[in-house]
Image (tube, rainbow, N blue to C red):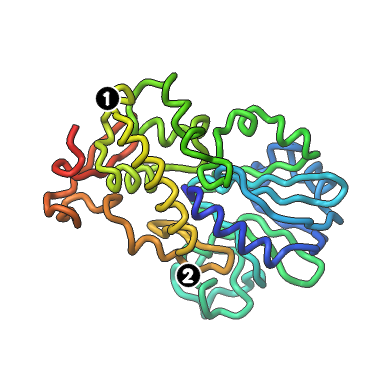
């Protein structure tokens, strides 16, 4: 699932491309995306004719601010990513690569990043007033799309319960440290708890813990003050660097232009099980914690 750096990268790209554009139509082959208002017909009434004011992010959610005080929320989930470009319906797939057979849309110019196979699962298109399209590629069809007044969206339980943003300028060490006093459990699971800190998932939790030399099974009670300070520092530095490098493309994620992010080259723990640790040479291990994988160095990150 795209995490904070990936969603932030997409949001920055969309904000540059979509501001002041008007949504004039939509197409989808999966109306189950529309949870609020429910159904394609009702959703159309909410967004057609609206101007895009700006695009922002909250946790892993893309927030598209519309005219008339409306707000569209897109959660891309496991395999979704939003792109801006030009597509056309496939009439004949004779001249397309084999892995494009069976798809409904293709880039108008079949060259460049949009021809990446991960960009071929177009399930939802918003037509813009300048002829371009905002498209959602989503292999697994897990994404969620909502539209309502801003007050309704921000009062949804899943939005209200979100924790603070780790890259917010007001997210000081004090604000990071205080919630730990009332928390128990394992550090890896807590870092991924969206009600505790927003936007961190499996990839960056592994990287933050490796950089901090903290075992993913360490309990909160076992951590010392220097551990918390190092966690705060590495959380900020890793997330900022990942945003600068436009995120991590391990599987499905691509940015708003259909391109891979570059942070995957910087990963030191995640998906490196069986390889030597870049810090000490011990073999990176992988384990399951609460149904999710965790990658760590058994020598550097002692329990």
Please provide percent x and percent y for residue 61: 60, 45
Q: State which quadrant residue 98 falls in.
A: bottom left
Q: Can you say which quadrant of the picture contains the C terminus?
A: top left
Mark count: 2
Percent from the top left, x then y, of residue 199? 50, 43
Left or right of 203? Residue 152 is right
Looking at the image, do the residues carrying marks 1 and 2 touch, with CB atoms under 8 Å apart? no
Badge 1 is on which residue? 222
x, y percent for residue 162: 57, 33
Q: Residue at x 78, y 57 (%)?
A: 52
- Look at 57% across and 47% down and name the residue there: 169
* Residue position marked by numbered label 2 in the rendering: 116
- Residue 270 in the image: above or below residue 86: above
**Is residue 102 shown to the viewer in this render?**
no
Q: Which mark is residue 26?
A: none
Q: Name the side, left or right, on which 224 lies relative to 141.
A: left
Q: Residue at x 48, y 33 (%)?
A: 174
Nearest the eye: 257 or 30? 257
């Amino acid at each position: 699932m795209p995490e904070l750096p990936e969603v932030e990268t997409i949001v920055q790209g969309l904000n540059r491309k979509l501001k002041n554009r008007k949504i004039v139509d939509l197409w989808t082959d999966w109306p189950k995306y529309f949870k609020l208002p429910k159904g394609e017909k009702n959703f159309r009434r909410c967004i057609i004719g609206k101007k895009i004011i700006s695009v922002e992010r909250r946790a892993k959610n893309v927030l598209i601010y519309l005219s008339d005080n409306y707000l569209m929320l897109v959660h891309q989930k496991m395999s979704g990513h939003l792109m801006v470009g030009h597509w056309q319906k496939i009439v004949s797939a004779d001249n397309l690569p084999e892995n494009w057979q069976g798809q409904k849309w293709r880039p108008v110019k079949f060259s460049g990043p949009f021809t990446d196979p991960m960009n071929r699962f177009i399930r939802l298109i918003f037509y813009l007033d300048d002829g371009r399209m905002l498209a959602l590629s989503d292999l697994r069809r897990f994404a969620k799309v909502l539209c309502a007044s801003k007050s309704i969206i921000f009062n949804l339980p899943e939005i209200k319960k979100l924790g603070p943003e780790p890259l917010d300028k007001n997210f000081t060490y004090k604000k990071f440290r205080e919630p730990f006093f009332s928390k128990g459990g394992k550090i890896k699971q807590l870092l991924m708890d969206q009600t505790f800190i927003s936007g961190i998932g499996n990839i960056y939790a592994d990287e933050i813990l490796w950089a901090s030399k903290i075992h993913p099974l360490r309990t909160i009670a076992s951590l010392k003050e220097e551990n918390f300070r190092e966690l705060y520092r590495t959380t900020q530095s890793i997330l900022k660097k990942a945003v600068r490098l436009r995120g991590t493309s391990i599987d499905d994620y691509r940015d708003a232009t259909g391109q891979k992010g570059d942070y995957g080259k910087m990963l030191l723990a995640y998906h490196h099980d069986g390889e030597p640790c870049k810090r000490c040479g011990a073999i990176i291990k992988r384990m399951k914690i609460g149904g999710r994988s965790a990658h760590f160095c058994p020598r550097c990150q002692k329990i």
